[in-house]
Image (spheres, helix red, strand yellow):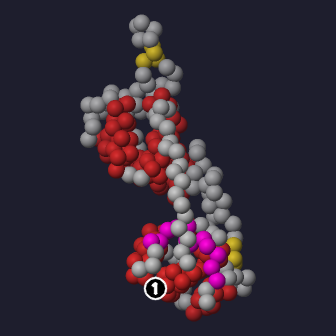
């Protein structure tokens, strides 16, 4: 333990004999990941996928902090974020920092521990748009289930997380995503095109019952087999007419 008390111990700044403010007391080894996730759901109103991501990043931070006992909490945070900055992409660094800001600023009520950390600026990268021939080569390398997923993404405009697990209304060619209870993204019904409909009529079951990681892996493998282009998520949202 670092000599810090759990959340809610005393939200008022304490002072010592010299009337100088004393740093808040926090116990990192007393943080319960499940309670943190409950806080995210209730007080922050975050969706389940976002909650799980924050919980995963918190668990990794707490595991790192356990190996750094004896260090000041400020040093633990700084060393951890430096390690993430050295080994991970900017987007991943932003995700970890977002978790720690919620943890220290909102959950533990100690914003001074994290307020100096800034989110990295977004770096602009040119978008790679494959040719029609490249897309056809990639598409033909997919199994039927993933051809349907690809076409549904291209024609419906839904996010991958909205499409997977969605129900279908075949009479209206409608996709009905599961309700999203987050505060930042909203999921609405959408529609798929005739090409998607033709493949759906030949498929037994619901092709949208798959995990996001599985779809990403299958798409990457198909792209490698086709030897055409490196798959990028943005490709999935192109309006494509297959011939």
Point out the stretch of residues depicted in magenta: 230-241
What residue appears at the point 43 percent right and 48 percent down from the top-left corner?
A: 93
Apparent side of residue 114 relative to residue 4 in the rendered image (left or right) = right
Q: Say if 186 sits above or below 31 in the image.
A: below
> Can you identify the residue that label 1 sits on?
141
| Front position in the image: 16 or 30 | 16
Q: Mark 1 packing: few (<14 Cα in 10 Å), some, or many (20+)?
A: some
**Residue 7 within the magenta-colored segment of the rendering:** no
**Residue 239 within the magenta-colored segment of the rendering:** yes
Q: Position of residue 61 (x, y in %)?
A: 37, 45
Q: Residue furthest bottom?
A: 202
Apparent side of residue 75 relative to residue 155 in the rendered image (left or right) = left
Q: Say if 180 sits above or below 102 in the image.
A: below
What residue appears at the point 42 percent right and 18 percent down from the top-left corner?
A: 22
Q: Position of residue 150 (x, y in %)?
A: 55, 78
Helix, strand or loop status at disc 1: loop
Residue 43, by quadrant, is top right
Quarter of the image where the C terminus is located: bottom right
């Amino acid at each position: 333990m670092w000599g810090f008390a759990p959340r809610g111990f005393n939200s008022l700044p304490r002072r010592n004999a010299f009337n100088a403010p004393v740093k808040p007391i926090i116990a990192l080894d007393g943080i319960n990941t499940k309670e943190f996730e409950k806080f995210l759901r209730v007080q922050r109103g975050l969706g389940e996928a976002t909650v799980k991501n924050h919980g995963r990043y918190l668990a990794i931070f707490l595991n790192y902090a356990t190996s750094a006992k004896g260090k000041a909490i400020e040093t633990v945070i700084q060393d951890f974020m430096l390690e993430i900055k050295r080994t991970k992409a900017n987007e991943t660094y932003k995700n970890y920092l977002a978790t720690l800001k919620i943890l220290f600023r909102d959950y533990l009520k100690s914003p001074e521990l994290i307020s100096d950390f800034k989110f990295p600026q977004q770096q602009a990268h040119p978008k790679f748009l494959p040719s029609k021939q490249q897309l056809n080569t990639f598409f033909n390398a997919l199994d039927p289930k993933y051809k349907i997923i690809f076409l549904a993404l291209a024609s419906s405009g839904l996010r991958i997380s909205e499409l997977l697990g969605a129900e279908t209304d075949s009479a209206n060619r409608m996709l009905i995503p599961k309700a999203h209870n987050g505060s930042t993204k909203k999921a609405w019904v959408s529609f798929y095109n005739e090409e998607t409909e033709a493949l759906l009529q030949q498929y037994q079951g619901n092709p949208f019952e798959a995990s996001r990681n599985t779809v990403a892996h299958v798409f990457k493998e198909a792209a490698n087999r086709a030897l055409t282009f490196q798959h990028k998520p943005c490709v999935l949202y192109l309006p494509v007419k297959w011939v």
